[in-house]
Amino acid sequence: MAHFAELDENNIVLRVIVVNDENEADGENWCNNLLGGTWKQTSYNRNIRSNYAGIGYTYDAEKDAFLAPQPYPSWSLTDDNKWIAPEKYPEDNAVYYWDEPTLKWAASIDASD
């Protein structure tokens, strides 16, 4: 089975559908002819277009890649089209969340205490 993402006029993913293998080779045109719209193939295992498309992702035609929404303004896009924080995630057993105002990882409060 192949997966195809429908894009709006701003290249934002509206939905992702599954297409039979027999239609995969010309899947983008097949989807357009059947459903209308603009379609791009996506892949669970990242074989094409860097990331599996999700609703709200953006298709970047220059990179030929699907990009997740930017989590925070301070995060940057890596060469393999993943978002990373400006500071590395701490390597201990605590749980952290990104605190955008301080641009640092902050320890989460354990609700079980």
Image: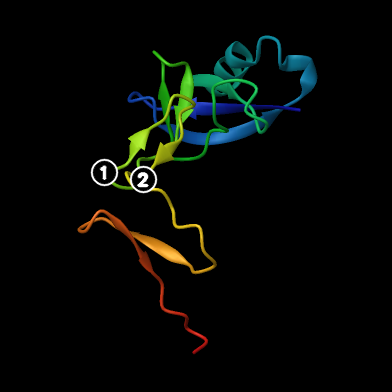
- Taking 16 as reference, is 25 left or right? right
Q: Earlier in the sequence, mark 1 or mark 2?
A: 1
At which x and y percent is residue 54?
A: 52, 39
In the picture, measured across the screen, residue 26 lies left or right of residue 74, that is right
The reply, left or right, for residue 88 in relation to residue 91 is left
**63 or 78, which is in the foreground?**
78
Please tell me which residue is depicted at 53% across the width and 33% down the height of the picture: 53
Pointers 1 and 2 in contact (CB under 8 A)? yes
Q: Residues within 10 Å of mark 1 (few under 14, many from 20)?
A: some
* Quadrant including the N terminus: top right
Nearest to the observer: residue 47 or residue 5: 47
Q: How many numbered marks have been drawn onto this rendered protein structure?
A: 2
Q: Helix, strand or loop at disc 2?
A: loop
Q: Is residue 37 visible?
A: no
Q: Secondary structure at mark 1?
A: loop
Give me the residue at 50% from left, 57% from top: 91
* Vertical placement of residue 3 versus 104, above or below: above
Q: Which residue is mark 1?
A: 74
Quick one: label 2, few (<14), some, or many (20+) residues within 10 Å?
Answer: some
Q: What residue is shown at x 54% (from left), y 21% (from top)?
A: 49
Residue 38, given in percent of the width and then of the height, sits at 47, 19
Which amino acid lies under the numbered mark 2 shown in the image of this protein?
Answer: Ala
Q: Residue at x 76, y 24 (%)?
A: 20
Vertical side of 94 occupied by 113: above or below: below
Q: Quadrant of residue 106?
A: bottom left
> Where is residue 46 drawn, in percent x and y?
62, 28
The residue furthest left is 101
Q: Position of residue 76 (x, y in %)?
A: 33, 35
Q: CA distance from mark 1 to mark 2?
A: 7 Å
Above or below, comparing residue 111 to residue 80 in the picture: below
In the image, which disc is placed on residue 85? 2
* Residue type indicated by callout 1: Ser
